[in-house]
Image (tube, coloured by chain):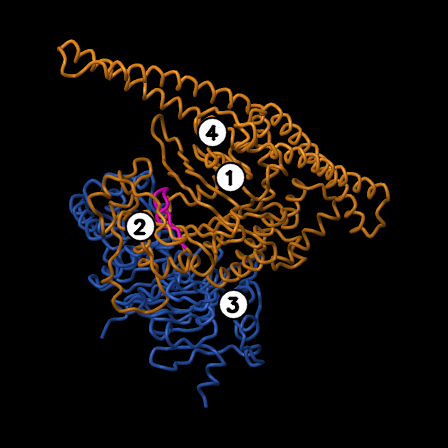
Amino acid sequence: MAEKVLSVKNLITAFRIDKKEYPVLRDISFDIYENETVCMVGESGCGKSVTTLSIMGLLPENAVVQQGEIELCGEIISGKSQKELNKVRGSKMGMIFQEPMTSLNPLLTIGHQLTEGLIRHKGMSKKEAYATAVQYLELVGIANAESRMKQYPFQLSGGLRQRVMIAMVMSMQPKLLIADEPTTALDVTIQKQVLILLNKLKKTMNTGVLFITHDLGVVAEIADRVIVLYSGTKVEEGSAKQIFENNMHPYTQGLLAAVPNVDKDDFEIKAIPGTFPAITETIVGCRFHPRCPYATDRCRSEIPQAIEYEKGHFVACHKVEEENKC
Amino acid sequence: MLEHRSALIELNKLKKYFPVKRGVNLKALEDVSLKIYEGEKFGVVGESGCGKSTLGRVILQLYRQTSGACVYHGKSIEEVAPKYIEKEIDNLLNYQKKADEYYKKAVELDKKIAEMDEKIEALSDHGTKQEVAKRRKITQERDKLSFQSKEYKKDASRQLREGSRTVGSLILSAKLPEIQRLYKQAYNATVRAGEYVKDYNKYHAEYSEMLTKGEKPAQDVMDKMREASENTKKCRDEALTCKAKALSMRRQDILPITERCLDEEYQHKLDRNYETGINLAKLTNKEMRSLRKDMQMIFQDPAASLDPRKTVGKAIEEVFEIHTDYGKEMRRECTMKLLEDVGLKREQYYSYPHQLSGGQKQRVGIARAIALNPKFVVLDESVSALDVSVQAQILQLLEDLKQRQHLTYFFITHNLGVVKHFCDRVMVMYLGGVCELAESKELFRKPLHPYTKSLLKAVPRPTVRENYEEETVLEGEVPSAINPPKGCTFHTRCSECMEICKKVKPTLQEVEPGRFVACHLYNK
């Protein structure tokens, strides 16, 4: 049985705007096991990034975790101070961001940035750290790793920078890797190289991966399990197969219908009508009902609960619930 | 079917180099030639740095091209009367005179060559050593002269070709001064017509302003409008009669400037050179600005292309302020109508950009672009920053607008899925060159170029597959455009690279009707 790496229970995170608190995450729970990639998808503003920041303890000042428990490798990390979190961040969980240029320091060499964490968290000597760094650069598929160590970020292309970021994070051998849109800024060919690399590393190092993206194509390629978020609520969760072949929630279906598929010939791009609700908007009942083609009176008054229909396949929707009753 | 459509934009060997430092250029575009037809959705795909954005901007003359031509057919020179045409008309006699001079020089040289040939004949190569040496010397000289004569002939026909751009085969006519006068008269009439059109627009704006205010339009404004439109027609007619008169002189009194001149075939060829479109690169900035009404652009990041301190309404109205004579009420009314056209609410006239979502901001960007009823719109990654569901909404809106306003799109993107379902024709670019150009259905059904194939393979698909990791990936990264690889630019990453690919650059060839590919694999 694979070990549980991360467990998030009933997480509610809110943003303070004009002295009022508006929840961005509304009761999110999920687990990530070893050697598993969990993809979180949804439109921008649905709370994907806030989830990762809540886990990492990197929320901006006007955000508060109102409720919930975050457990990393059996240790509860929610509510810890920044100082205590510093021991966990980097060593037990690492994060890769979307834009590799902004997360690398342009004034320091790649080598300096790669060894910094090793020396600090792992207590290695400079020489050991250097050797490890080179080894990881080779692992992520960078040729002439030794000469790259002396280069500055601006000398590398986008794909290479992202590989350096991955090497930096993975050299700490974290149990949990959080990747927030790591390939969105890359071209498709480079994206594929990076995705295959991430998948390989996950297997060899037995890491749990939380992968944030809005590209459903990418999700289908690498996910073991998928969580679909809409406006801070988890509307559907299931294995990649369940989500792509047996999806139930109208939102998931709408999202998939909107993706222009290169393989299909007669395909009409269908849009979900309406717009994504702002966090300040109060919606009674299901958050999706104003845009849902199947909305009933019940959807307008009662918040649907997530129900498990198949093993590991959760859906929060009244329509699905009623259809499966009879 | 494609032949029946008329081209809107024609590019010919377009090049764009960005200077990096002395002697070093970033070759963003290399010899791009293509036609964009009226009413089509033309897609361009490629990785970042392949030159797709540069191409879009060069067409709009936001960057001036290094060489090559970009011809716009949406308006004819009869409507616009750009200054460069006047210069060309003034230059007509010069072209003819120079062609004549060059050709005469060539003829003289030919005479000399003939003499030399005789001399060579006279000297047998079995003669004495001296004779052989002399013969060799003369032969060398003759070869030099014959080369020169050929160059002169080329120069002569080049001059004629330049001239034929403005007047077609009339450049050969003996009555060229007369023709030049007629063309000049036509040109001046066109310029006058342009001024009357401006007047008309001004009065028309006044008139519509009164109508929107709910007033009865004043009689004198209406009279002025009628007068302006009558004058415009008079000038147009004058221009047309002049041109018709000039054209009636075709095939008559042809000067035998070069030996080919009397050949009907050659005359037809010169006639085909006659340019009806507008060469954008030759326009002055002011002229280009007036053409911008016809050619617009929608950018990628809607947040960055809107002024955060201006309300949505003001941002759209600005377009009318700059390009039209509309009064205040009229501008407001047009803006309100536009907001509805792009799927926004009238109330959003007063919103600031930060109050809108990404999709709504993009709708404002679209409203600004289509405000002046353009013919040609460049969309530079316009849906790439949006979420899939919003992206689908915007694509639907673009499709509707295209049908309603008969737009032609130049759609730049890196998302192959979008291209497939949105565009009629697709061009694949790599390192500033064109790899493949085909109808989008055909391209996706059967990609020919190895680069297109590997691009298609790399696209993430929303279906779960088992063998994802075993699939081949395109190795390496795009080389630098400062020093692109010799031969085929793609050969460094190509899985089917042959010897010839490393040396010879493949040209774009039509392998099937409407299907172009630049690859040695398909060279017969």
Q: Which residue is mark 2?
A: A162
Q: Relative to A162, is B165 on the left or the right?
A: right
Dot 4 or dot 1: first in sequence order is 1
User: Where's residue B339, x and y in %?
Assistant: 64, 55
From the image, state whether disc 1 or disc 3 is nearer to you.
1
Amino acid type of the residue tagged 2 in the rendering: Gln
Which residues lie in the magenta part? B428-438
Contact, CB < 8 Å: mark 3 with mark 2? Answer: no
Residue B313, how many percent across, how many down?
66, 50
Chain B rendering hue = orange
Is residue B4 shown above or below B232? Answer: below
Question: Under tag 2, what secondary structure?
Answer: helix
- Circle on res. B71: 1
According to the picture, the residue beneath numbered tag 3 turns out to be: A272
Q: Of circles 3 and 2, which is in front? A: 3
Residue furthest to the front in view is: B122
What chain is tagged by disc 3?
A
- Whether the residues at callouts 1 and 2 have beta carbons within 8 Å, the answer is no
Which picture quadrant has residue B286?
top right
Q: Secondary structure at mark 1?
A: strand
Question: From where the camera sits, is residue B279 visible?
Answer: yes
> Which of the chains is blue?
A
Which numbered disc covers residue B261?
4
Amino acid under disc 4: Cys
Occupied quadrant, residue B18: top left
Distance between mark 4 and mark 1 Cα atoms: 27 Å
**What residue lies at 24% left-to-right and 58% top-to-bottom?**
B472
Q: Residues within 10 Å of mark 3 (few under 14, many from 20)?
A: many
Q: Nearer the viewer, mark 2 or mark 4?
A: 4
C-alpha gap between disc 1 and disc 3: 40 Å
Q: Which quadrant holds residue A95? A: bottom left
